[in-house]
Image (tube, rainbow, N blue to C red):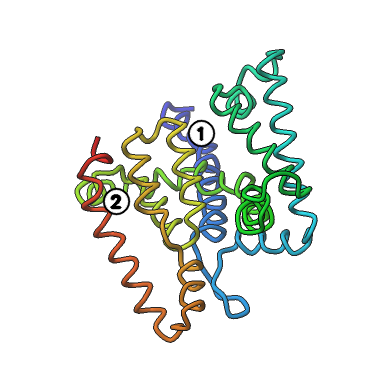
Amino acid sequence: MSFSQVNLDDAEPSAPIHRAHLLKFLIPSLIGVLLFLVPFQVGGSINIGMGLMADGLQSLLGSALPAIAMLVLCLSVVITLYVKVAKPNWAQRGHFQEMFDVDTIWVVMRILGAIFVVMTFFQVGPEFVTAPFTGGVMLNDLAPVLLTFFFFAAILLPFLVEFGFMEFIGTMVRKPFRVIFNLPGRSAIDATASWMGSGTVGVLITAQQYEQGYYNAREASVIATNFSVASIAFSLLVTNFVDINHLFVQFYFTVVMSGLIAAIIVARIPPLSL
């Protein structure tokens, strides 16, 4: 057997490996794009796939969500205090350390949050905390939405950010994003997820990328404050509220253009420029 034949035989098994790598990039990334970046109309409203899942879970749990939110907050405080005092081995590494071994200021904030939510849920304490338009808004209106939204985001977000899609897009648009916004190219995914899908998703992506070292503090601050502003779904809600549905395209185009112009300017002046 010749040397060329040996090389050829050795090279043949590598073809399936390349296909496997390509599929590992394409399939999860396509799922992530469909879940987070593609808006579609359902029942007269515009939403993204993950948003529909969150809405479905919210409808399923219904009135139980405020109680679940209270239990989650209280459990978070209990585990955080246990980790700070006992310092168990399982909480000294990885995601557990990030979630529960936090600075003192965050321990205090979690304790206060748990106290306020218990007061609001049981309607005990001063009215400025428990009233429907203060604590009631947070517990009964905001917490159920965030609870269901972050539940699915924590599970599904890796499809968008962990399989090479952000690196691929970042390579494609690195130069224009650096010139226009003074930001890395991978932030284009943040911008798209915020404008087309949800501002909350954009903030989640930005926070995760910052914690993993892909953004510095300035870049993360610019992205979170300039791109995670007004999604399609939120803009549609606004047009419905003010009864200008027939002008939605013009309204949203104006919002996007104003936001992009503001991002170009604001990113270059203090405090974000610093």
* Residue 274 seen: yes
**What is the quadrant of residue 250 in the picture?**
bottom left
> Is 164 situated above or below 197?
above
Which residue is drawn at the image coordinates 56% and 47% (left, top)?
157
Q: Position of residue 126 (x, y in %)?
A: 67, 46
**What is the quadrant of residue 171 in the picture?**
top left
* Residue 152 seen: no
Q: Position of residue 84 (x, y in %)?
A: 65, 17
Residue located beneath label 2 in the image: 173
Q: Position of residue 31 (x, y in %)?
A: 57, 56
* Disc 1 versus disc 2: nearer the observer: 2
Label 2 sits on what residue type?
Answer: Val
Q: Closer to the N terminus: mark 1 or mark 2?
A: 1
Q: Position of residue 82 (x, y in %)?
A: 72, 20
Label 1 sits on what residue type?
Answer: Asp
Residue located beneath label 1 in the image: 9
The local secondary structure at tag 1 comes to helix
Q: Closer to the camera, 29 or 182?
A: 182
Which residue is drawn at the image coordinates 68% and 50% (left, top)?
130
